[in-house]
Image: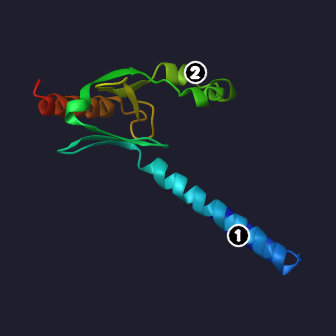
Amino acid sequence: MAFILLAVISVSAQSESAGRKVGALIVIVLFAVLWAGFLTRLLTVGVFVSDDGIRIRLPLQTIALRWSEVGGVYLAPVRLPRWLSWLWALLKVRSLLSTSRAIWIERIPGGPIQTFLNEKSAEFLGRTAAFDRAFQSLKLEVERRRGTA
C-alpha cells in the first residue's frame, strides 16, 4: 500500500495537465484494486471441510467436492502447474520443491487435485510435525465421512 500511496503523491506533484493526472490516478487505483483482490485470494487458499464435503481453494479457482466425490487424501511431491514451468529455471526452486510434499485429494471421477498445502509453504515452513498433524487430521476426517475409518 505504501507503493500505491507514493505513486499517487508522485503523480499529483507532477506538472502535467489535469487530464493526464486523472488518467494516471485511475490506472494506479485500478492496479491497487486488482492487487488487493489477488492478495486477498492468495491469503484465503486452503482446504475447508464441512458437512457437505471439501472445498479446495486455489489461487485461480475453487473446487467443491461432495463426500461421495472424495476418494482419499495422500501425500505426494509438489508439482508446479505447466503455466508456471518457467519458474523452475528463473528461481532455481526445483530442489526446494522436489523435496517438498503436498496434500493431494483424490477426486472420483477425475484425477487428483494438488492443494496449496505443502510442508514448505508459509503455514508450515520449518514445522514438519504441524504439517503431518494437519494431513493426518484431514485424512481421518475423509475416512470418517466416507465410512472407511
Are discs 1 and 2 less than 8 Å apart at CB? no
Q: Position of residue 98 (x, y in %)?
A: 50, 19
Give the camera-side residue of 78 and 120.
78
Q: Residue at x 17, y 30 (%)?
A: 140
Q: Earlier in the sequence, mark 1 or mark 2?
A: 1
Q: Quadrant of residue 141?
A: top left
Disc 2 packing (10 Å; few <14; some 14–19; many ≥20): some
The answer to whether residue 124 is visible is yes
Q: Is residue 20 above or below residue 27?
A: below
**93 left or right of 73 in image:** right
Q: Position of residue 126 (x, y in %)?
A: 41, 33
Callout 2: SS: helix
Query: Which amino acid, mark 2?
Result: Arg
Residue of label 1: 26
Where the C terminus falls, by quadrant?
A: top left
Query: Which amino acid, mark 1?
Result: Ile
Q: Is residue 11 above or below residue 93?
A: below
Q: Residue at x 53, y 27 (%)?
A: 80
Residue of label 2: 94
Q: Position of residue 33 (x, y in %)?
A: 58, 63
Q: Residue at x 62, y 62 (%)?
A: 32
Callout 1: SS: helix
**57 left or right of 15 in image:** left
Give the camera-side residue of 53 and 117.
53
Give the camera-side residue of 57 and 127.
57
Give the camera-side residue of 24 and 7.
24
